[in-house]
Image: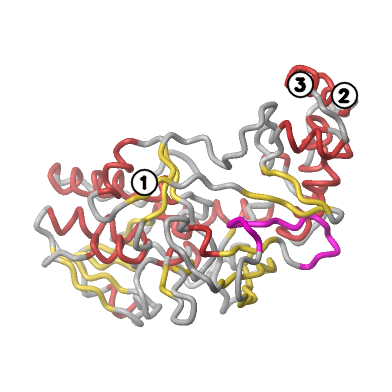
Amino acid sequence: MKFGIAGAGFSGAVIARRLAEAGHTVDVYESRSHVAGNCYTERDPDTGVLVHKYGPHIFHTDDERVWEYVNQFGEMVPFNHRVRTTVGGRVFLLPVNLLTINQLFDKALSPDEARAFIAEQADTSIGEPANFEEQALKFVGRPMYEAFFYGYTKKQWGMEPTELPASILKRLPVRFTYEDSYFNHPHQAMPRNGYTEIVEHILDHPGITVHLSTPYSEELRGQYDHSIWTGPLDAWFDYRYGRLGYRTLDFEEIRYDGDLLGCSVMNYGDYEVPFTRISEHKHFAPWETHEKSVAFREYSRECGPDDIPYYPIRLANDKTLLNQYLEAAEDADGVTFVGRLGTYRYLDMDKTIAEALTAADGILAALDEKTPIAAFYVTSH
């Protein structure tokens, strides 16, 4: 069978590899001049630093299948991501932990004392939180909310936190220990030679042909028995119901002769500071040594038609529009939608790979059973 795949990021590459290994012919079309999608990494010619071109990507997972999979295609080096935030001219640890609490309130609380103290700060008058702000106030109280969540959230999403759903802040973002690793997963790592090399290795199969700088057009679709679409869900349908909402990012480069931050990521929680964070990329590879540095300020804004979509907004209007596209996708013939854009969800890399493997399994099973290939292979939207 002949497959056409739109997109050479992790979703497209993983599915292409599985289909090619099963004996199928696969053409992968990538509109950019490189593979690896938003995970693309490249060496900066001036500093030698391995740069995450579209913003930092840290691999973390508790999925053993995914962990074993990525290790087949590149060397993964243990890496614990640690984030700091500058608020009111002071630097704090993130996620909020016991040191953050003691710093903010100028105390020396034990874990149990801190739990009791934060419980006193919490707004107990809020029943079921109706929005992001109420969710935060109910669990951590106003001082912590205003210091670490209000300004950053408003900049990231371009609206007041009262306009955002409570579900964005899914759980209590506080640790009552001094643990400052950003993620809790057992496997946390960076690829020694970058994500681009891993994706290149995944795509390195005689059954796969990669076409760079070539969008997967409607004319091309007709050449294949089945299409795998990793682009924006609404784009497949030529935006017939309207455009789904996204936030995009602008990056401002900083070159520095030395060490700028002393850490990989510094958030800026004050709303008056126009950018959300600065990432200093040499700290994503602490096993390397670089005298010079390259860093990037990130600015979040509404995504336009010609911008790279990063974060699905998923407000009420977007969910209504999404349902229209999901229904259209289920009725569409000859196409499967996968990945962050194809399913209009924010997915970490490990979830992206896991769902791509699941989709490939589902496609191959459908072919074996001579049943229709499904439009989606995800657990929920």
Label 3: few (<14), some or many (≥20) within 10 Å? some
- Give yes or no for contact between labels 1 and 2 (Cβ–Cβ under 8 Å): no
Q: Position of residue 220 (x, y in %)?
A: 28, 78
Label 2 belongs to which residue?
Answer: 124
Label 1 belongs to which residue?
Answer: 355
Chain-order first, disc 1 or disc 3: 3
**Residue 8 seen anywhere in this rendered image of the structure:** yes
Report the number of numbered marks: 3
Instruction: Specify whether residue 267 is painted magenta.
Output: yes
Label 3 belongs to which residue?
Answer: 110
Label 2: few (<14), some or many (≥20) within 10 Å? few
Chain-order first, disc 1 or disc 2: 2
Please name whichever residue, 332 or 304, is drawn nearer the observer in this view of the structure. Answer: 304
Query: Which quarter of the figure has residue 39?
Result: bottom left
Chain-order first, disc 3 or disc 2: 3
Amino acid type at circle 3 is Ser
Would residue 297 be found to the left or right of residue 4 on screen?
right
Label 1: few (<14), some or many (≥20) within 10 Å? many
Amino acid type at circle 2 is Thr
Q: Position of residue 176 (x, y in %)?
A: 70, 26
Instruction: Specify whether residue 232 is painted magenta.
Output: no
Query: Looking at the image, is 31 positioned above or below residue 286?
Result: below
**Residue 312 seen anywhere in this rendered image of the structure:** no
Mark 1 or 3: in front is 3
Identify the element where label 2 is drawn: loop
- Give yes or no for contact between labels 1 and 3 (Cβ–Cβ under 8 Å): no
Magenta stretch: give its range.
Answer: 261-274
Q: Position of residue 267 (x, y in %)?
A: 70, 56
- Give yes or no for contact between labels 3 and 2 (Cβ–Cβ under 8 Å): no
Please name whichever residue, 107 or 145, is drawn nearer the observer in this view of the structure. Answer: 107
